[in-house]
Image: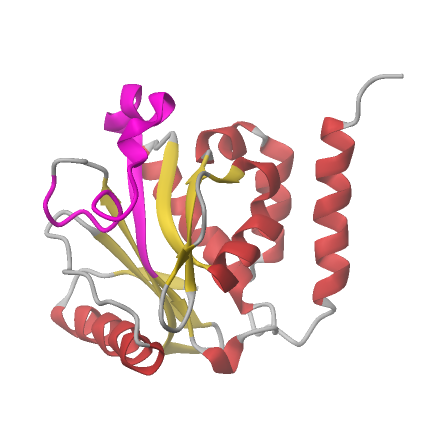
Amino acid sequence: MYEIVSTKRQQKQFQDSWEYFCEKYNWENDPYAKDGIRYNLLLPEKKKKVIGTIEFIPYNPKNPDSTVEGRFPFSTFEDIRINQNRVWEIDKLCLNKEFHRQGYFENFMNVFYDHALTHKPKYYVALMEKKFYRMIRISFGLAVEQRGKDLVGPSSALIPIVFDIEKIMRDEEMVKNLLAMSSSSKKPKWDQSLSIKIILAKIVHKIKPNM
């Protein structure tokens, strides 16, 4: 369950959620991009409760408010440079700690799907907090690539990533499986290790060479 931020109330909920984590973990609070598309992740059984956030911003290395380029030179990669008009930045990704390890992170799959279906990006780029990088990599596998060394800060490390979302969207079976993991109904606690094993098994099967 999610909502696209389009009202002042939704924007305030987004800011309250994101800025709380910035203050708690000493994260830098980047400006809210004028052309950014923001989503509130909602608790399925309490649809007005925001439990997470994410922002997508059209990538422009010359944008002084870019959340990534001033800290890591994504524009030096040829695949990013030649597809710049189909690259988006991911920023302000967070999930309330109260809802970690309960399957709620998988609800972001519907958010990625909605944005990708609407805006047809080829790549996402991000400087992603290490914990979220691991979760994204578990969910999307080899489509998520670390492109540089960890950027170590006072309270956490940021990982420069390139996410080939077009590769995922072309794989109808994987999209179906990812969306199946995300539910708009009440979500009980589940065996996260089992879901991880299932996804990894599918990835291994796809890259297994012919004998």
In this view, the residue in front, 86 or 71, is 71
> In the visual, does 11 lie left or right of 173?
left
Please check the rendered image and state whether residue 70 is part of the magenta-colored stretch, yes or no: yes
Residue 127 percent location from the top left of the image? 36, 51
**Front-most of 9 and 20?**
20
Quadrant hosting residue 155: bottom left
Residue 159, placed above or below residue 189: above
Q: Is residue 180 left or right of residue 198?
A: left
Q: Give how far across and how far down residue 186 sits, in percent.
A: 57, 74
Side of 185 relative to 152 (left or right): right
Query: Which residue is at 18% across, 47% downward?
Result: 66
Q: Is residue 191 visible?
A: yes
Rendered-image quadrant of the N terminus: bottom left
- Rendered location of residue 203, percent (x, y): 70, 37
Q: State the residue at coordinates (35%, 21%).
A: 78
Question: Is residue 100 toward the left or the right of residue 177 in the image?
Answer: left
Counting from the top left corner in percent of width and height, residue 41 is at 39, 66
Q: Which residues are magenta?
A: 63-92
Residue located 40% across and 70% down the image: 42
Residue drawn at 71 percent across, 55 percent down = 196
Quadrant housing the C terminus: top right
Does the stretch in magenta take in 55?
no
Q: For the view shown, which residue lies furthest in the right direction?
A: 211
Total residue callouts:
0
